[in-house]
Amino acid sequence: METYSPTNLSGLRIALVGPLPPPSGGMANQTQQLGELLSGAGATVLTVQVNAPYRPAWVGRIPVLRALFRLIPYLLALWRTAGRVDLFHIMANSGWAWHLFAAPAVWVARTRGVAAVVNYRGGEAEPFLRRAGPVVRFTMHRSAALIVPSGFLQDVFARFGMAAYIVPNIINLDRFQPRGPYTPGQPHLVVARNLEPLYDNLTAIRAFQMVRQHHPQARLTVAGSGPQAAELQRYVQDQNLAEAVHFTGRLDRAAMADLYRSADLMLNPSLADNMPNSVLESWASGVPVVSTNVGGVPYLAQDGVTASLVPPSDPQAMARACLALLADPQLWQRRAQAGLQQARRYTWTHVQPVLAGQYQLALKGAWNASLHTQ
């Protein structure tokens, strides 16, 4: 391996372990984008996909069997790849995703003598670590580094005896470009979260109903997929909102960029969160954000400056925040500009040296000794 500096990754061979689109989503998009950026910086990137398609396809309909059919090829891919790289970069999440994918990657890397950098990104880390903290710590002892995208997760891991370093999520300002000023009249609101209970899309739809009482021409686009899709669509039908609310399903990166540029506000109604990509993407698109104040969101956004933060499960508060921005184009513009300024802190230019520095420490073995705070 060539010697590299914190701004030059040329010659480094990295196994990037994580999900890839399809389907598009926060971690899958970040994995894909990180692979592209690392390659562009001169690293050799081999991707080990944790959500590879089932072969044969019918296996995916049988719960236990599908786990085996995915896990065995995944372990073989990890083993083979470990012989060709200097470092594993493991995109990790909570729950079964940790046990089935992240933890095995750490152990394979350890067995093959490869440095493992665990990039933990789950917004539900605290309840997961309350249940499985000792098991996670046991595996983390075998890793070279733990990196997280936010101060929120750094604090969570510290409470469970594990030190983490912050390497933020990355926003591509070439893809997500700012829209023009807001013109009152027919506001377009957007939600871009999975359709599952954790993200409480129903609160956003109810808030939109209240906004529509003041802006009858308002419309809402819900960009995501998940188990609550039919339930949410039934609610929209029952409330006679079908002409105003559009469900797009999950969109790819280019389509999401186009959607943000057409939006006037982005709503993030989640009940637990870390460093949501949808907030970064909205900021980069010049779109003000109204979000719940849960988890890592207050670490990322400042209420009244870069976003309007409201309590979770409170459609009235979310609606009031939306109406305040829609009633005041100058406030809307100040919020959009503040968000755009904040987004520039998360470009590859800023994040690359931080990430490369962590790679260097991991390869030198300098990180593991400080991985545990107690």
Image: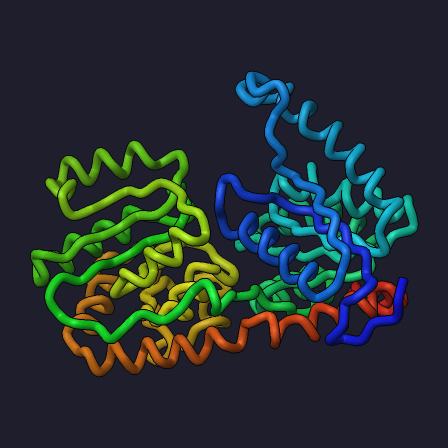
Q: Residue at x 80, y 32 (%)?
A: 76
* x and y, in percent, of residue 241 in the image: 14, 44
Above or below, 122 against 364 in this view is above
Q: Is residue 304 left or right of residue 208?
A: right
Q: Residue at x 69, y 24 (%)?
A: 68
Residue 348 or 289: which is nearer the viewer?
A: 348
Residue 270 or 185: which is nearer the viewer?
A: 185
Residue 266 or 142: which is nearer the viewer?
A: 266
* x and y, in percent, of residue 343 in the image: 47, 73
Q: Is residue 8 left or right of residue 190?
A: right
Give the quadrant of residue 257.
bottom left
Colour mapping: rainbow
* x and y, in percent, of residue 203 in the image: 28, 51
Q: Quadrant of the C terminus?
A: bottom right
Above or below, 342 against 152 in this view is below
Q: Residue at x 24, y 64 (%)?
A: 317
Q: Is residue 237 left or right of residue 337?
A: left
Give the quadrant of residue 80.
top right
Q: Residue at x 22, y 52 (%)?
A: 220
Residue 252 or 104: which is nearer the viewer?
A: 252
Is residue 374 something that shows in the picture?
Answer: no
Q: Quadrant of the N terminus?
A: bottom right
Give the quadrant of residue 333.
bottom left
Is residue 350 something that shows in the picture?
Answer: yes
Q: Give the number of marks.
A: 0
* x and y, in percent, of residue 101 in the image: 69, 40
